[in-house]
Image (cartoon, rainbow, N blue to C red):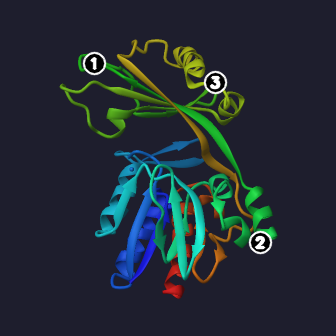
């Protein structure tokens, strides 16, 4: 059996694992690494239809990983080097010993692929490198506000898009959105900033940006009560604004042994783009196994 490493436990990576398990159960030993520590309703905004997963996008990822039963899914695995080793690949990670794989699938953001050290650069053609370097991403901040159980947030909506504020773009009353309202659990509010705001403050510390977001949030929701706790996160690679030319869905850096890249950077930045890329990557995997 071929030992396949999928780097990145997002939508593309998790669906790749699911398809491998479903279609080629006796040919592969699947390993999924992600550097993070852990892995709908519909509304209209102007002429755009937006889909929201009531239990979060992570619930879709968890479903695909569950469907890839038997796959070894490991978090806090930050890949740094990939070396050619005999008929396969030796993959190194921060704080761990190198491991050998027959096939490697890279589904992390394109800039992180370009940062990999080892033999990846030597196997990457000049034209491929130029195409990858042309990929760009938007950046934004997300703010989570958490409240005690007795707190009430009286608004008539669960999700709202904001078009008239330079900072705030999206607000969700998270317990309403997920239909998890409970007397024993307090409400929570999730706020996403606009892309221009994210780019403007990208290199600043989160502690410096958080008060700015809170001040703008007061303008949008002046009656919002003070939260019990707050968590601020920076999304450097929030959405793809320019993907690989011609949107191929995948890029094969080396065919034998196989080293292939996928993700929304190779299609377009939405749910469909991630799924489309996973299907293209799976076609390449299937033909090589």
> Which of the pair 204/2 is nearer the observer?
2
Q: Horizontal and vertical percent for residue 70?
A: 29, 70
Instruction: Identify the secondary structure beneath mark 2.
Output: loop
Q: What is the distance, in whole Å, between disc 2 and disc 1 at their CAs?
A: 55 Å
Between circles 3 and 1, the one closer to the viewer is 1
> Which of the pair 9/194 is nearer the observer?
9
Q: Earlier in the sequence, mark 2 or mark 1?
A: 2
Query: In the figure, residue 237 lies in which quadrant?
Result: top right
Q: Is residue 194 above or below residue 75?
A: above
Q: Horizontal and vertical percent for residue 90?
A: 53, 69
Q: Which residue is mark 2?
A: 125
Looking at the rendering, in which quadrant would you find the N terminus? bottom left
- Mark 2 in CB contact with mark 1 (< 8 angstroms): no
As drawn, the label of residue 220 is none
How would you rate the neighbour count of disc 3 (Cα within 10 Å): few for under 14, some for 14-19, many for 20 or more?
few
> Which of the pair 52/208 is nearer the observer?
208
Q: Horizontal and vertical percent for residue 235?
A: 57, 39
Q: What is the distance, in whole Å, between disc 3 and disc 2 at their CAs?
A: 44 Å
Q: Horizontal and vertical percent for residue 251?
A: 65, 71
Q: Earlier in the sequence, mark 3 or mark 2?
A: 2
- Mark 3 in CB contact with mark 2 (< 8 angstroms): no
Instruction: Identify the secondary structure beneath mark 1.
Output: loop
Residue 190 lies left or right of residue 268; in this view the side is left
Q: Which residue is mark 3?
A: 165
Q: Residue at the spot x=67%, y=54% of the render?
A: 115
Q: Which residue is mark 1?
A: 148
Q: What is the distance, in whole Å, between disc 3 and disc 1 at their CAs?
A: 28 Å
> Exactly how many numbered labels are in the figure?
3
Between circles 3 and 2, the one closer to the viewer is 2
Q: Residue at the spot x=51%, y=75% of the render?
A: 103
- Residue 214 appears in the rendering: yes
How would you rate the neighbour count of disc 1 (Cα within 10 Å): few for under 14, some for 14-19, many for 20 or more?
some
């Amino acid at each position: 059996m071929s030992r396949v490493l999928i780097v990145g436990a997002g939508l593309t990576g998790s669906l790749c694992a699911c398809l491998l398990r479903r279609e080629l159960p006796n040919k592969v030993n699947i390993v999924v690494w992600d550097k993070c520590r852990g892995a709908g309703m519909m509304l209209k905004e102007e002429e755009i239809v937006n889909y929201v997963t009531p239990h979060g996008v992570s619930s879709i990822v968890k479903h695909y990983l569950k469907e890839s039963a038997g796959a070894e899914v490991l978090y806090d695995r930050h890949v740094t080097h990939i070396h050619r080793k005999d008929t396969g690949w030796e993959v190194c990670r921060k704080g761990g010993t190198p491991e050998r794989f027959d096939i490697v699938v890279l589904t992390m953001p394109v800039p992180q692929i370009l940062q990999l050290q080892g033999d990846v650069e030597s196997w990457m053609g000049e034209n491929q490198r130029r195409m990858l370097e042309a990929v760009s991403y938007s950046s934004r901040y997300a703010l989570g506000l958490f409240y005690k159980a007795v707190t009430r947030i009286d608004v008539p909506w669960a999700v709202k898009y904001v078009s008239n504020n330079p900072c705030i773009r999206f607000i969700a009353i998270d317990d309403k959105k997920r239909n998890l309202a409970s007397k024993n659990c307090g409400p929570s509010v999730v706020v996403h900033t606009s892309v221009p705001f994210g780019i403007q403050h990208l290199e600043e510390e989160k502690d410096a940006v958080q008060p700015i977001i809170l001040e703008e949030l007061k303008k949008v929701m002046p009656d919002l009560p003070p939260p019990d706790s707050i968590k601020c996160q920076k999304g450097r690679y929030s959405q793809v604004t320019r993907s690989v030319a011609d949107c191929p869905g995948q890029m094969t850096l080396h065919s034998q042994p196989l080293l292939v890249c996928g993700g929304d950077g190779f299609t377009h930045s939405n749910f469909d783009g991630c799924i489309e890329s996973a299907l293209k990557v799976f076609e390449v995997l299937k033909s090589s196994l």
